[in-house]
């Protein structure tokens, strides 16, 4: 999912098609992560039963558009990342392929594809996967829930909010992110999150975690 150069953990989007920072599962030593897997609690009969899974666990789908990712990057004042994130969203550009010579940065979405389905699955065991519109896996990694609204996928940190069957993500932008590697990772994080957009829970299918309440 890392553009031209994509994992949870949380989040993949050029976009979720290449190896992501999620492949590196290191997290901050100062964090006190909450486990993503269900904990055992005692039922009234005394028999251990799993507690409800975190709301994050599940498969979430979004119809990705070039306009949405450009809007998010412009709002974050990260316009230099636009060429990294729009590649897969432009007609005729293969996965992780270079932008055509005719691509105009002043009109980044002039040849954009129509809205295209993309999804992320957060499994109960802490695994993260992303899938393209054909259900093919295009990213993988691991994620850690830090608190009710923060998670990491690999070394990238995200904020998230679950409301009913929708989820919204935002990217925690690191300070002094000037190296090429950091900018590439940041572009990947935005392609995973699509800040400002709302992803919808998938209710059935092979990538819906068992026990998430809908699978």
Image (cartoon, rainbow, N blue to C red):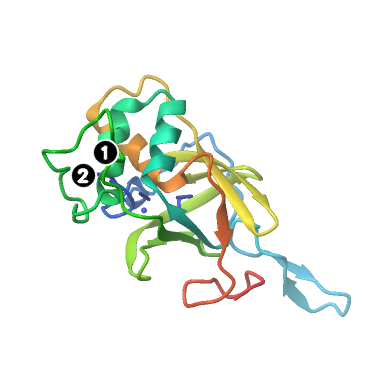
Question: Of residues 81 and 48, which is closer to you in this image?
Answer: 81
Labels 2 and 1 touching (C-beta < 8 A): yes
**Quarter holding residue 159:** top right
- Residue 155 seen in this snapshot: no
Residue 100: give its label. Answer: none
Q: Is residue 38 above or below residue 180?
A: below
Outermost residue on the right side: it is 44
- Please, which residue is most extreme toward the left here? 101
Q: Quadrant of the C terminus?
A: bottom right
Report the residue at 34% width, 66% height from top. Answer: 137
Is residue 89 visible to the viewer in this orientation of the structure? yes
Category of crowding for the residue at label 2, using alpha-carbon neighbours closer than 10 angstroms: few (below 14), some (14–19), many (at least 20): many
Sort mark 1 into few (<14), some (14-19) or many (20+) by Cα contacts within 10 Å.
many
Left or right of 110 on screen, residue 114 = right
Provide residue 77's location: percent of width, then percent of height. 41, 23
Q: Is residue 143 left or right of residue 212?
A: left
**Mark linked to residue 84:** 1
Q: Tag 1, which secondary structure?
A: helix
Q: Say the numbered circle drawn on residue 4.
A: 2
Closer-to-camera residue (195/173): 195
Residue 37 percent coordinates (x, y):
59, 63
Mark 1 or mark 2, which is nearer the start of the sequence? 2
The x and y percentages for residue 122 are 51, 60
Whole-percent x, y for residue 47 in the image: 79, 79
| Image quadrant assignment for residue 27 | top left
Cα distance between the residues tagged 2 and 1: 6 Å
Quadrant of the rendered image containing residue 212: bottom right
Image position of 190 (left or right of 145): left
Instruction: Identify the residue at horizontal 19%, vertical 56% (top origin).
Output: 94
Badge 2 marks a residue whose secondary structure is loop
């Amino acid at each position: 999912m890392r553009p031209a150069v994509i994992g949870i953990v949380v989040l993949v989007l050029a976009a979720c098609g290449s190896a992501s920072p999620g492949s590196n599962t290191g997290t901050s030593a100062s964090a006190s992560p909450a486990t993503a897997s269900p904990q055992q609690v005692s039922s009234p009969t005394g028999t251990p039963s799993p507690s409800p899974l975190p709301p994050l666990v599940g498969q979430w789908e979004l119809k990705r558009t070039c306009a949405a990712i450009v809007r998010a990057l412009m709002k974050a004042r990260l316009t230099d990342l636009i060429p990294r994130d729009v590649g897969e969203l432009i007609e005729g550009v293969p996965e992780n392929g270079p932008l055509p010579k005719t691509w105009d940065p002043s009109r980044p979405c002039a040849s954009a594809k129509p809205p295209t389905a993309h999804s992320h699955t957060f499994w109960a065991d802490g695994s993260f996967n992303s899938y393209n519109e054909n259900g093919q896996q295009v990213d993988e990694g691991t994620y850690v829930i830090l608190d009710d609204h923060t998670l990491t996928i690999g070394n990238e940190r995200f904020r998230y909010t679950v409301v009913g069957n929708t989820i919204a993500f935002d990217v925690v932008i690191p300070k002094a992110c000037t190296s090429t590697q950091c900018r590439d990772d940041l572009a990947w994080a935005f392609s995973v999150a699509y800040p400002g957009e709302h992803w919808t829970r998938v209710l059935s299918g092979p990538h819906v975690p068992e026990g998430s309440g809908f699978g």
